[in-house]
C-alpha cells in the first residue's frame, strides 16, 4: 500500500473510534471524506478488530528528547553535553545518533518513527504456540461449533489441563487477524455469521441492524396487510450502488405497484424525508402502512409516523423474505440499475419513468394484469 493511499494516524484512529461505536462503513467514509477503499483497507487489515493500542516505555527516548538531540547537534554541542542536558547516559545518545545516520543527517521526526517501528514486539498468540489446542479448536470449528461452545467444551473435557483453555474472543481474533497465522481463514465460513470483518465484542450490539428504538414487529401488522386484501400497505427498502449511492423502493403489497425515490444519502433524516414526501402524495386510501427491514435508515420512524399517520412495521432480524414483494421487485430493478454502478446519475424523473415502465408490465401473480391496472381496479 503506497503512502499516497494510506490513512493518516489521526484518520485511522477516527475510523476505529467510529467503527467501535457501531457506525457503518458508509457513515465513516462520509465523515472522513475519503475513499471507501482506504477505509475498507484499514478495517480489513485486522479483520474489523481494532489493533491493540501501543504505549511508549517511560525509559525510552521520547519525541521531545529526540528534538532536543537534533537541536543540540545543530548547535554543535558534544554528545556528552546533550546527554547531560537530557539526564541520559552518553552511550544512549551515541547509539541513538549512530542508528539514525550520524550527526550530519540526524532528524528527530524520522528517528522517532523508526524507533516506534523497531519497538514492535509481536507475541505469538496462544493458538499459534499450542499445537494441541489449535488442533482441537480447528476440529470443532470444522464441525460448525461456535467459539463460545468450543471454549466451554474444552473446560469440561479437560478440567485439570489449564494449557487447553482459550476464550471465545481469542478464537475470533485468531480467525479474523490472519497475521497470527494459527487458524485457516476458510474456517470463518463455518461460523454462524460468516462475515468478512468483525465488530469488537464490547460494542457489537450497537452495530446490529435490529437495534431500532420503538420498533413495532411485523407480527403486529394488520391481517388485511398480511393477506393482501386491501391496497395501501407497502414494503420498502434501499437499492445500493457504487460510491455510497442509493435509491429507495416502495412496493404496494396487493398490486406490486412500485415507487422509486432518489436519495442523497442513506442517513435516517434523508431517507425519512424522502419517504414522507412520497407517501403524502398518495391518495389517502393508499396510506395505510409500510413494512421495512431493520436498517438504521429507519431510526427516525417515530417522527415519520407522527407526521404522516402511517405506521412502520419491522421485519424480524435476518428475515428479508418477510418483504417478499419488495425483494422480488428489487431483483427486477437490477435490470435498470446494475450492481456496482453509480445510482446518483439517475434523476427523479428518470426513476419515475422506470417505475412507470415496471408498473405496466403484466404479472403472472396478478392474472397477467399489470400492477397499474390491478391497483386502479382495486381503488375503483
Image (cartoon, rainbow, N blue to C red):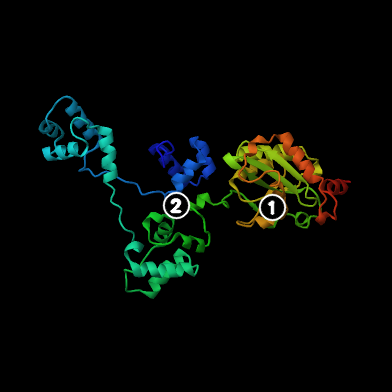
Instruction: Compare residues 108 and 30 and report the one nearer the observer.
Output: 108
Q: Residue furthest top?
A: 75
Q: Secondary structure at mark 2?
A: loop
Residue at image location 61% in from the left, 49% down from the top = 214
Quadrant into which the N terminus falls: top left
Q: Secondary structure at mark 1?
A: helix
Q: Are marks 1 and 2 in contact (CB under 8 Å)?
A: no
Point out residue 116 in the picture as x, y percentages from the top left corner: 28, 42
Q: Earlier in the sequence, mark 1 or mark 2?
A: 2
Q: Is residue 280 visible?
A: no
Label at residue 294: none
Residue at image location 36% in from the left, 49% down from the top = 52
Q: State left or right for residue 245 relative to residue 176.
A: right
Q: Quadrant of residue 7?
A: top left
- Vertical side of 285 occupied by 134: above or below: below
Query: Separation of disc 1 and disc 2 at Cα?
Result: 30 Å
Mark 2 closeness class: few <14, some 14–19, many ≥20 residues within 10 Å: many
Q: State left or right for residue 359 relative to residue 183.
A: right
Point out residue 45 in the picture as x, y percentages from the top left corner: 42, 49
Residue at image location 13% in from the left, 27% down from the top = 77
Q: State left or right for residue 315 relative to residue 377.
A: left
Instruction: Compare residues 274 and 289 and report the one nearer the observer.
Output: 274
Q: State left or right for residue 13 relative to residue 281.
A: left
Point out residue 249 in the picture as x, y percentages from the top left corner: 70, 44
For disc 2, the marked residue is 47
Point out residue 109 in the picture as x, y percentages from the top left corner: 28, 33
**Number of numbered discs visible in the structure rendering:** 2
For disc 1, the marked residue is 327
- Vertical side of 259 occupied by 314: above or below: below
Amino acid at each position: 500500500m503506497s503512502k499516497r493511499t494510506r490513512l493518516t494516524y489521526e484518520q485511522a484512529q477516527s475510523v476505529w473510534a467510529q467503527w467501535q461505536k457501531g457506525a457503518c462503513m458508509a457513515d465513516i467514509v462520509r465523515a472522513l471524506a475519503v475513499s471507501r477503499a482506504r477505509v475498507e483497507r484499514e478495517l480489513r487489515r485486522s479483520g474489523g478488530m481494532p489493533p491493540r493500542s501501543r504505549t511508549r516505555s517511560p525509559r525510552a527516548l521520547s519525541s521531545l528528547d529526540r528534538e532536543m538531540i537534533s537541536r543540540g547537534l545543530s548547535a554543535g554541542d558534544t554528545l556528552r553535553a546533550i546527554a547531560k542536558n537530557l539526564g541520559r547516559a552518553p552511550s544512549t545518545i551515541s547509539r541513538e545518533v549512530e542508528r539514525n545516520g550520524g550527526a550530519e543527517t540526524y532528524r528527530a521526526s524520522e528517528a522517532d518513527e523508526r524507533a516506534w517501528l523497531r519497538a514492535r514486539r509481536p507475541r505469538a498468540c496462544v493458538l499459534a504456540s499450542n499445537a494441541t489446542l489449535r488442533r482441537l479448536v480447528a476440529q470443532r470449528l470444522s464441525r460448525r461449533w461456535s467459539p463460545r461452545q468450543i471454549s466451554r467444551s474444552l473446560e469440561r473435557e479437560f478440567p485439570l489441563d489449564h494449557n487447553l483453555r482459550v476464550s471465545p474472543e481469542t478464537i475470533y481474533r485468531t480467525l479474523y487477524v490472519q497475521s497470527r497465522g494459527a487458524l485457516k481463514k476458510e474456517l470463518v465460513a463455518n461460523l454462524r455469521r460468516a462475515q468478512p470483518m468483525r465488530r469488537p465484542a464490547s460494542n457489537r450490539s450497537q452495530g446490529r441492524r435490529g437495534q431500532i428504538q420503538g420498533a413495532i414487529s411485523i407480527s403486529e401488522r394488520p391481517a388485511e396487510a398480511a393477506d393482501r386484501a386491501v391496497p395501501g400497505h407497502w414494503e420498502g427498502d434501499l437499492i445500493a450502488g457504487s460510491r455510497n449511492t442509493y435509491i429507495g423502493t416502495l412496493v404496494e403489497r396487493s398490486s406490486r405497484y412500485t415507487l422509486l425515490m432518489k436519495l442523497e444519502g442513506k442517513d435516517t433524516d434523508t431517507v425519512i424525508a424522502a419517504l414522507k414526501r412520497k407517501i403524502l402524495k398518495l391518495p389517502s386510501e393508499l396510506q395505510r402502512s409500510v413494512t421495512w427491514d431493520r436498517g438504521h435508515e429507519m431510526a427516525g420512524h417515530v417522527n415519520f409516523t407522527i407526521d404522516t399517520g402511517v405506521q412502520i412495521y419491522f421485519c424480524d432480524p435476518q428475515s428479508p423474505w418477510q418483504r417478499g414483494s419488495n425483494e422480488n421487485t428489487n431483483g427486477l430493478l437490477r435490470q435498470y440499475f446494475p450492481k456496482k454502478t453509480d445510482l446518483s446519475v439517475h434523476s427523479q424523473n428518470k426513476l419515475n419513468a422506470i417505475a412507470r415502465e415496471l408498473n405496466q408490465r403484466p404479472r403472472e401473480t396478478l392474472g397477467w394484469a399489470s400492477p397499474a391496472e390491478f391497483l386502479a381496479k382495486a381503488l375503483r
